[in-house]
Amino acid sequence: MLFYCAFTWFPGTTRKDVAERVVRQHESGKNKPENIKGWYNLVGGGSGFLIVDYDDPRELTAFLQPYMDVMSFDVRAITENTYEGTVEDMKKFLSGSSDNDPIAL
């Protein structure tokens, strides 16, 4: 399952604090880069988001917990949509032909 994990550094957290933590977790084999599908920083620094893939949310929690003293997280399960497929689903929804089908609008 894919998860969107937005992060924001706590006030007073430095680039060095975050770098030390990331490197420590990496060197101990706990970052599991194969689960990180995307890592984006927002312009200006101190925040960004990860797209990660975990079958068990408890494993995701174990991945994030070592960072929770330097940054906060907003975690949400996500699904991927194709543009054409989503437009077709919306057309069906509007026509009334898929009232009972789950659809993400």
Image (cartoon, rainbow, N blue to C red):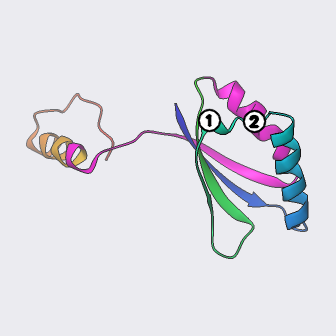
- The span shown in magenta is 56-85
Residue 62: quadrant of the picture: top right
Image coordinates of residue 8 in percent, x first then y, are 73, 60
- Residue at 90% x, 54% y: name it: 20
Residue kind at label 1, given as amino acid type: Asn
Which quadrant holds residue 28?
top right
Q: Inspect the image, locate mark 2, and give the three-letter code of the amino acid beneath it.
A: Phe
Lower sequence index among marks 1 and 2: 1
The residue where tag 1 is placed is 35
Looking at the image, is 77 positioned above or below residue 42?
A: above
The answer to whether one can see residue 90 in this image is: yes
**On the image, numbered disc 2 is attached to which residue?**
63
Residue in the picture at 67% in, 39% down: 33
Q: Residue at x 62, y 55 (%)?
A: 49
- Residue 17 position, x and y percent, is 90, 59
96 part of magenta stretch: no
79 and 94: which one is in front? 79
Q: Measuring from the top left, give residue 13's x and y in whole percent.
A: 88, 64
- Left or right of 58? Residue 82 is left
